[in-house]
Amino acid sequence: MIKFDQLISHRFRGFSDRENTIEGLVNALDYGVQVLEFDIRVTKCGTPIIYHDENALDKNGKTHHIANIFARDLEILGGTFAHMPTADELFKTAASHRNNSAKLLVDIKDFGFEEEINALIHLHRLEHRTVYVSWVPNVLYRMAEIAPHIPLCLSHWPQNPNKAIRAKHHVHEAVHGDVPRLVDQYIHGQRSGWHVDGGLGGELRDIIKNSGGSVCLPADMLNQDLIKAYQADGIEVSAFSFVDWQIMDDFEKSFELDLYFIDNKTVFENHPALFRLVSYGTLAPGRHNNNQLDDLKGNWVTGTVKGQIIDVSWKGQFGYPAFIPDPDGDDISVYIFESRDLPGHWARLDKFEGQDYRRVVRSVQTEDGIIEASIYKSEHS
């Protein structure tokens, strides 16, 4: 079964009406998503903003090239431009959100602005949660120099791109897997990428491997031998994009990918972990807050989770149990409530648990094997 933290929210699609927005970010983080990808373009004045395409429409339906627009004019132009947050705004929001374990896949579309983007990551203290992603190898070469501790991910075409792709992108061709550094000082306002047939090689492969990084491939170009070769070299493989579980299950059986880009919120909503609640305290059967589950139909099973239990104050009273995840911790006996009604009650239960607890997904050992389920962890860890 694909784990919940293998699901990447692709541009926060489905979590708001528009992709790559602050609203989408917050809603995805509120939902507990653990890996989020978003795109950075750079305006004419050098301001990194959150958007995918190189062009956008103003309030009158006129197309403008983002590389020719000043950040100060985004609101004036209106239309799509009015919904583009700056990278600074998005990083600030992510850094202050209580879902502070979510990974951020920062997909950088322009080359020549790495110092500015990395400085914002450092300003908001997000280095330990960041992965730098790009279709532009120069971006990754530069990031390896200025931020060697941050994982890198190259997106590339492992098969010959078709005419439709080539019509929209400047496609570079790798020779024997080698992707050299280009001499350009800036690659600004373009769509470009590399066709790397048979897998990445040379210096860039070593850089990605040494960073603890990955590659990202189109789902319709996957090759089992290529994936296994990357994974055998310690390079994770993700693919884009998926919209339903049946297709993902088929891909998992065939390829065993490390991560999956998701374009449909219902994929998150239908993950089994969202229909299971682990209780180690007052919500368990016979405990005094079990009535919070009275309106839900389901059944209880038992199991164990790895971690620690500490005493914390809850709603003004001390001595309530709180869970701290720890893969090397004790086996803690728990109850697991399984109910198809749970997704409709998570918002209420989150509010009931309060700010001292945060719902996360963890592996649980049961008599029938290891499953994934939702559990409230301590925010005091």
Image (cartoon, rainbow, N blue to C red):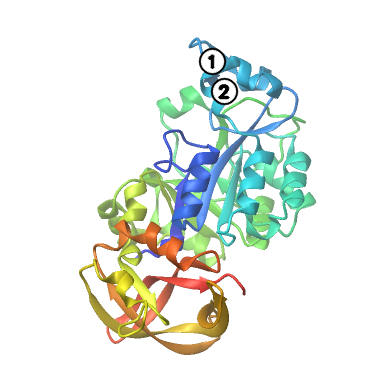
Q: Nearer the viewer, residue 333 or 154?
A: 333
Name which quarter of the figure residue 334 lies in.
bottom left
Q: Which residue is the extreme one toward the front?
A: 316
The residue at the point 40 percent across, 65 percent down is 3
Residue 58 numbered mark, or none = 1
306 versus 71 height, above or below: below
How far, Cα to Cα, is label 1 from label 2? 6 Å
Tag 1 near tag 2, CB within 8 Å: yes
* Residue 28 spot, x, y in % from top left: 47, 49
Q: Is residue 142 visible?
A: no
* Residue 209 spot, x, y in % from top left: 63, 60
Mark 2 is surrounded, within 10 Å at the Cα level, by few (under 14), some (14 to 19) or many (20 or more) other residues, namely many
The residue at the point 68 percent across, 62 percent down is 210
Mark 2 highlights which residue?
A: 81
**Marks 1 and 2, the one that precedes in the sequence:** 1
* Residue 164 spot, x, y in % from top left: 41, 26
Q: Nearer the viewer, residue 51 or 282?
A: 282
Q: Is residue 373 left or right of residue 360?
A: left
Question: Which quarter of the image is occupied by the C terminus?
Answer: bottom right
Residue 14 numbered mark, or none = none
Amino acid type at circle 2 is Phe
Amino acid type at circle 1 is Asp
Q: Nearer the viewer, residue 270 or 106?
A: 270
88 versus 30 height, above or below: above
The residue at the point 49 percent across, 24 percent down is 168
55 versus 266 height, above or below: above
Question: Which quarter of the image is occupied by the N terminus?
Answer: bottom left
Q: Is residue 2 left or right of residue 176?
A: left
Q: Is residue 284 left or right of residue 172?
A: left
Describe the element under mark 1 as helix, strand or loop.
Answer: loop
